[in-house]
Amino acid sequence: MNAVTEIYTGFKSLLIGMRVTIGQFFKPAVTVRYPHQTLKIPLRYRGHIELVGNPASGKPLCFVCKLCERACPSDCISVDGVKLEGDKRKSVTSYKLDFTRCSLCGSCVEACREGAIRFSRDYNLAGLAKEEFLMDLVQRFQAQQAEAKPEVRSAKPEVLAEQKRETANVSLNPTP
Amino acid sequence: MSALFSKLVSLLDTEPYRLVVAVVVIVSFVALNAAYLVWVERKGAGRFQRRPGPTEVGPAGLLQPVADGLKLMSKQLIVPAGADSTLFRAAPLMVMAPVLMSLAVIPFGRGLAARNLNVGLLMIFALGSINVMALMLGGWASRNKYAMMSAARVVSQNVAYEIPMLLVVITLAMVTGTMDLNQIVLQQAGGFWHWNLFRVWVNPLMPVTFLIFYICMLEETNRAPFDMAEAESELVAGAYTEYAGMGFGVFFMAEYANIVLGCSLATVLFLGGWQSPFGLLPGVGWFLLKMYFLVFSVVWVRWTFPRTQFYRLLNLSWKILIPVSLFTLILSAAMIKLPAMIKLLRALL
């Protein structure tokens, strides 16, 4: 009799398991088809750093004070600039980031008084050679500007406002 | 035009042509099923795990089997040093050939069987046992101790499950009184309550018999939850460890071909073959519908249950399935002979 009840309860539990899986079968997939679809990256995402532009002039806010360079514990930033005729401050000509050594600690972003650098939300960073991670952020900034985005990414207060607006970061965001 | 067509059809029905047509149809049916059941399995696995499954090769991943096939065919067939090369090469063929031969007697529709043998059921089980031997040979010929051990596991597993399967089939042969698969289907005409699955007035345990047949079919095809032989999640590939390229591919195809055969047989024996469940429009469509439902359920079972332990597997067979199937055998024998026995007793008293 014991064996019979055992078979009965065992078989019943098998059927319950089958019902659970068939229930899942008809529900939509939860995966993101990565290269075709991407998740919206949260604003607080810590990618490598990038230069912030001045919305009025479209040039980097950075004026080569080199606080970030000094703040960096891994010694992976080197900034260079020139003083242009008629400008009060220097303008940046090269901002070298050795991303192979960067530990994304964020000391440079904290050190910057102007809010001239921030974390990018770039995470597709696979590369075939080490040199691809020796980045020149000025070139990157110019390339971004050349893409002629009408919205110029803004300085800190506006970022925070944007952050408040976009609370849901999980919405799917098909890439073109 | 139609006269020409009917002439062509009647020509194809004459002997040497009929044979060629049957061979071509069965081989292509098996190959197509083996290829696309892999796709069904992968899509099914994806859906059960809330993933999309293959999507990249062709629309909805439909060209995935072609890509897999090309990959396997482009690989070298390696015969390991010291292996018995003849047996090593013969084993995949010996797994595949019995399935193709068995499908010759399956009635897909009215008169739609390559050969209408009156001992078709017997032939299928006779050929089915070659499968086990071929796996054993494959494992043994590879001269690899792991392949050898898992081949031994395959044999002990398949021998344990051959017994309840055959007992169930004997029960069925007693109930139907014939081994002709076409006759068995014809007996089940006129609605689903005539199917052998629901023939409870002959043997009240008919649904249990079907269940035992189904479990044994899962086991004979080495499917999860009884896939110790291959155990692809932790072993390399069980008895197929040393096989590369299409040698492995043929084993893989044979697994799916065996599933098609097992499900076809279950459909013919228990679910009325090509008979319609409501007595309307019997035809090959019903057969395929029932068979593919069973195939789907095999995928469903695989992605629901984890693998059992080896001793549990043998316990299930020796302690539950064999006693129960013996009981159904005796019960149906008694039920069939009951009227005659009552008559005899009356005459004696």
Image (cartoon, rainbow, N blue to C red):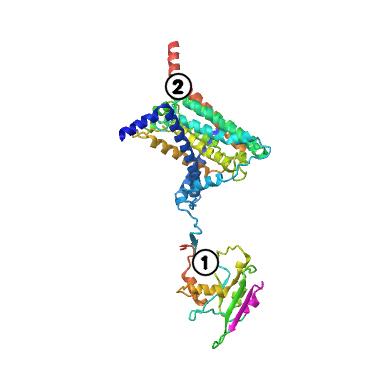
**Image: A142 above or below B22:** below
Nearer to us in this view, A74 or B102? B102
Magenta region includes residue B322: no
Magenta span of residues: A66-82
How far from the left and from the top, in percent, is residue A131?
62, 67
Task: Classify the position of the C terminus of chain B by image quarter.
Answer: top left
Neighbor class of circle 1 (other Cα within 10 Å; few <14, some 14-19, many 20+) is some
Chain letter, disc 2 residue: B
- The secondary element bearing badge 1 is classed as loop
Residues marked 2 and 1 touching at CB (< 8 Å): no
Q: Which residue lies under the disc numbered 1?
A: A42
**Image: B21 above or below A102:** above
**Image: B337 above or below B36:** above
Residue drawn at x 59%, y 77% as measured from the top left: A94
- What kind of residue is marked 1? Pro
How far from the left and from the top, in percent, is residue A78?
63, 76
Nearer to us in this view, B126 or B302? B126
Q: Which mark is residue B349?
A: none
Neighbor class of circle 2 (other Cα within 10 Å; few <14, some 14-19, many 20+) is some
Quarter of image, res A139: bottom right
Q: Which residue lies under the disc numbered 2?
A: B336
- What kind of residue is marked 2? Ile
Residue B247 makes an appearance in the image: yes
Please state if A39 lies on the left or on the right of A48 as rendered: left
Chain letter, disc 1 residue: A
